[in-house]
Structures are given as structure tokens and as C-alpha cells.
Amino acid sequence: MDSDPVLRYKFDPMSNDETSQSGVEQRLIREVAIILSKDPASIPPGASLPSLGMDSMGFVELLVVIEKVFNLRLIESGLTREDFETIHALAARISKGLQG
Amino acid sequence: MKVSLPYVQNRRYLTGIDWMIGALDDMSHRATGGGNSFQIVLELKGSFDDDHFQREAESFVRHFPALGGHPARDWTGAPYWKMPPPVLSVPLVLEFFWIEEPALSAALEQSANTRFSESRIHLAMRVFHITETRHVLAVQFDHRLFDATGAEAFLDLFHRWLTGEDCRTRIDAISLKEPAHLRDWMQKFEAGKQLIRMVRKFAESKLCVLSRPAPLAGRRIKFAVIEFDAAESRAIAARASREAGFLMFLPYTLAGSLEALAPAFARHGDVGDDFVVSVSVDLRTPDTAPARLFFNHLSFLFFQIPKALVGDRAKVLSLLRSQMYEQVKSGFPKALYESSMLMRLAPLPLLSRGMLRPLRGEFASFGFTCVGKSGYPFDRFGAAELVNLIHMPLVPVPPGLGFFINQFGSRMNAVLTYMDGMLDDEDIREFRETIRRLL
């Protein structure tokens, strides 16, 4: 049952090559694939999260992963569509946060 | 001729959540005489052939021995679902009615409240013909064997069967494997401690609850169905995103239901301080549901909202978002899932009597479920056009009050489900009006 995303509680920490925007993007694809039980190769960075089947619960799980991996707490950041709709946009938001 | 199944194939171990759902079934049965089941209603347009449907339904369910099973325990005490050997028929209620349109709601309510007549019947299909081209199929599922998402996956498979698709691969892919969960006891006890901390926190607060009428026995569960058309549903999604945040549909609809129900609590003299809402969450993803359609793959979140805050939408939304986040972050759904394995030691009647004792008999002001986008992807069911798909769950007593949201295609449906006598006509009228305005 540990394969159920919401039951997962162990996360690999961020590696050095995951600090660039493309590195963040690759890590997010991996995490979204786990949350949605999909093949990472089937997740284009430009696809909107809802179109991939992401719902509120999965999205909160993703935000928790972002806090645990990138040390960024985004739940109180306004959660605007522009910043969160795609993995690409989210990676840009995280990269900005990591630099700031 | 009876064929014995190998030992490992005639049983599916029950998880702690399955056992809790069984306890809720027992609790509701003792309280009202009803059970813990739910109904999915399919509104159909076009032709509908009863004989063909009956033949295909009987033939389809034969592939699922689980539908004729019942709970049992093995020599270690671990509970499991005992499946009968493959036989020519699996118990299934199949009924057909002709009915006038005005009588439909009452018929659906009666259908949803019908208790399975035998302990080994877990599925009922009732077809209501209104005209030659308008029909309603009500499928009643035993919650011990299906959850809402699993039931939609079951209907998906049945539709494929009805249209002549070769379903063997899909049927073979359905997994009934579950370990006995008799290992990692320390992990389960640690999870239990986390659950107890949460229970203590709730036990300290004075819960808002609607008083239940007496006597409870024989009381039905009633339903107020609120359908939103495609344009209304789009507007709700846009407002949810704007006010609650991107993909925060669950907190948004929960905040709306809380605000719409609050006047009824006030009108009936509730003196509690906090609303506590239990929210069921699916542990599967849309891609894994078809292979795990039987039994309950759920856990729960609990939200606690001070009564004084209700009406201040921004504050309630912020609190709900933050509580949801903190529970996922702390692994509460996992803790509940793990620790519930310990509850399997208790026989169902004992568990159903004792599990709410630390909470003085009440665990929530109401239950809330947001299935989200339907797992049923077709706009047809068999040969007929599928106009809408609505869930009508029997809410367990207690709390005897629940709010359920599902999205089918471009439409959203909301269903308020309540025990007869807990809300009056004025409450329902106001709720219908308010929820439309608030969402």
C-alpha cells in the first residue's frame, strides 16, 4: 500500500542537479508520476495538472512533496492558476523561490 | 458441480478501513434498521431492452465471486471476505418498473433505502421506465464491497460488457490480493498513537450536531439532489479556483456546504462550538481504480471549524486549506489506514458500539465526499445515451447527515443526504437556495 501516493511519507532529498529549472521540472515530473500512478514519460511539462487527472488531494500531496524536497511552503502563496497550472510553470515558480 | 477454489483464491483479507466500513454498516443497522450502502443513478435516454439487460447482467456478475461473499475470520483472527466457489449464478437483485415521472424521486429513495434481503447479496439493479425513451437505472452497492470510485469503475466495465467488448483482460486484471496485515505491529501502534492524539483533540471540543429524532428504528435516509448544468458547473469551477486557489475544489465546496448547512444547525438549537467534518479521500488514482474496484480504498481527513468563523468565507477557506495540508504532511491518512488494522481484532458489533465512545458517541457534524471527476468516462450506457450520473449514498447514523459531490462530464451534482426527521422542509428549501448561491 506504500505505492498509494497519499500514504507515502518518505521522500528523496533534492540533489544538486535539481536546483536548475530543468532539474526542478524533471523532479516534479517524477513526483507527479508517483502521485498519479503514471509513467513519467507520459507527462509533458506543458500539460495542465487537471488534464492529467490531478485533484485537490493529489495537488496538496504535491505541495507537501515540494515543501519536503525544496523546503518551500507554497500552500499559503495564493495558489494562482498562472503559477501552478503546469509542471513547467510550477518549476519556474520553485526555481524563483530557490533563488530568492 | 461445485469446484473448490485454492485456499488463497477464495479469500481477500479485509483492511482496517474495510472493517470500519463494516462496523458503520452494523452501527446503522442497529440504529435504524438500514445498512451502509449507496446507490448510483444513471439517467438514460433512448431504447432499453429489459430482456437483453437481464441476460447480460446475470452473465456479467458471474465473473465476480466476490459478489456472493461474506466476512469471515481465519485461524489467526484476521478477517477476510470469503468468496464462494465459481457457480452458475451470483446473487443479484434485478427489478424492472414502469413509473410516472412525479413518483420517481420517491421510488429512488425507496430503492436506496432497501436493505439487501440476504447477507450474501451485495448488488441490486433496478430499472425505472418513465417513457419508451426515458429510463433511470439505480444500482445499489454494498459499501462493504465497493466504494464510490470502485462502483464507477464497475459500471464502466459493465458498459463495455453490454456493448460487446471483450472484457476478459480487464476482468483478469482486477486484483483481489491483500495481505493479512499481521506484520509491522509497532508501526501500527505508532499510527494508533497519532490517531488517539487527533481523537483527544476532537474530544476536547464541543461538537455541533443536529439532534436525531426518536425513535430511530425504521427511519429512512432522505436525499436532496441539486443538479448543476454545464454552464453553472464551469462557473463554480472558476469561482473555486479564484477564491480558494488552483485545484482547491474540495475546500471550496466544503466551505460552501458548511455555510449552507449552518442555518439548519442554528434553527434546531445546536449549542456546540465547532463543526467537525469527516471527509473521505480516495487512495487510488484514476488509472489504478479499474484494477482495484472491489472493497474500500479510502482514508479520511477531519476538519474542525469554529462555529463563530462560519460566514467568513476567506477565513474558513484558509483554515480548511491549512488543515488539509497539515494532515497530509503529518501522514494522518496513512496513520488512520495503518491504525485501523488494529480495530480488526474487535468483532463488528463490539467495534460499532465502542469506536465512538471516546468521542461521546459523535465523530462528526456531517460527512463530506467529493468524488471529483467521474471515473465513468462514457456518455452512453449500453445502447442508451447517458444524460447524468448521480451518487445517492446512505449516510451512516451517526452522524446521519452528509453532503456528496460528483462531476459527470461537464456537469456537477450535489446531494444532501439526511436521516428523516433531522431536517424539515424549510431547512431543505433554504439549503437548496443557499448552496446554489454560495457555490
Image (spheres, rainbow, N blue to C red):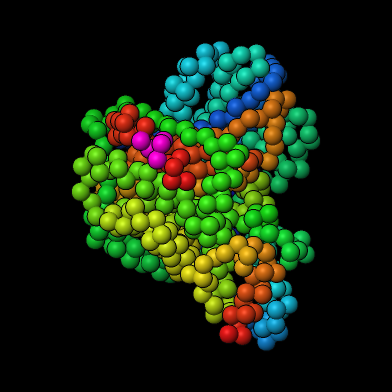
Q: Is residue B431 magenta?
A: yes
* Towards the viewer: B263 or B401: B263
Q: Is residue B244 above or below residue B405?
A: below
Q: Is residue A73 magenta?
A: no
Can residue B351 be seen here?
A: no
B292 displayed left or right of B266: right
Name which quarter of the figure residue A45 lies in: bottom right
Residue B310, x across and y down, in percent: 33, 53
Residue at horizontal 76 percent and vertical 61 percent from the top: A42
Give the residues in magenta. Answer: B430-434
**In the foreground, B274 or B311:** B311
Q: From the viewer's perspective, is B174 left or right of B306?
A: right
Residue B254 rendering spot, x and y as whole percentages: 44, 50
Q: Quadrant of the N terminus of chain A?
A: bottom right
* Residue depicted at 60% across the width and 83% down the height: A98
Q: Residue at x 49, y 20 (%)?
A: B104
Residue B397, image x, y percentages? 34, 39
Q: Quadrant of the C terminus of chain A?
A: bottom right
Query: Residue B99 placed where, x, y %?
Result: 53, 13
Q: Main SS of the magenta segment?
A: helix
